[in-house]
Amino acid sequence: MLLSVVDRDRLSLAGRGIEEKRERGIDLSRPDGVKSTERRYAPQEKGVFEMRDDNCIFCKIIAGEIPSRTIYEDDDFKVILDAGPASRGHALILPKEHAADLFALPDETAAKVLPLAKKVAAHMVEVLGCDGINVLQNNGEAAGQTVHHFHVHLIPRYENEQNKSLLTWGQADISDEEMDEIM
Ligand code: AMP
Ligand code: ZN
């Protein structure tokens, strides 16, 4: 069942709407022809959780089996510099316990992520003198996730940086009818 773990009364987008549309026989195809109900991205359900994945590069970094530039560490997290940085100081927050993505991340860990992002980001402003910071987190290959161990990107931004179009996007062509349809 779609979205069975959330409180549907509080979630207007998609969940209830899709059920109603299905009951009313409304076409649920996406613009690319794939049925909305055919979930292509199949994240792990909450509660399915491993301490470590032996094939995971970030688990190896956390275990110290692969070198990294660690800028912060506590019982739950390691924060490292991204090896392919988008900007000077680009860092990754890695929970020490393996979780493939946001869906697999225990709530307890998730609750600690943003306070840590805030702490590291404040330190970045002080130490790097950056003018802004993007906080980014990708889930699924369609969203650009390449390492399937949950992580948060902290990307310092500089007024005079060359790559000004980094993390900007053009507006998608979605009609008002489509907007209403997904509600
Ligand atoms: P994502 O595309 O959100 O999954 O981001 C994965 C990030 O991990 C990319 O920005 C990579 O540059 C970075 N990365 C991959 N391997 C390493 C590594 N060994 N050390 C540090 N960063 C890495
Ligand atoms: Zn891992």
Image: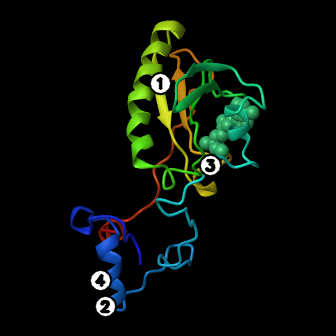
Residue position for label 1: 133
Q: Are marks 3 and 1 in contact (CB under 8 Å)?
A: no
Q: Are marks 2 and 4 in contact (CB under 8 Å)?
A: yes
> Which of the numbered marks, if any, corresponds to residue 169?
none
Residue position for label 2: 24
Comes first in the chain, label 2 or label 1: 2
Q: Would you say residue 113 is visible in this rendering?
A: yes
| Quarter containing the C terminus | bottom left
The residue located at (66%, 46%) in the rendering is 52
Q: Is residue 57 above or below residue 154?
A: below
| Quarter containing the N terminus | bottom left
Coordinates of residue 158 in the picture (x, y in percent): 53, 17
Alpha-carbon distance for marks 4 and 1?
41 Å
Alpha-carbon distance for marks 2 and 4?
6 Å
| Secondary structure state at the residue bearing disc 2 | loop
Residue position for label 4: 20
Residue position for label 3: 144
Residue placed most toward the observer, 23 or 26: 23
Q: Quadrant of residue 166?
A: top right
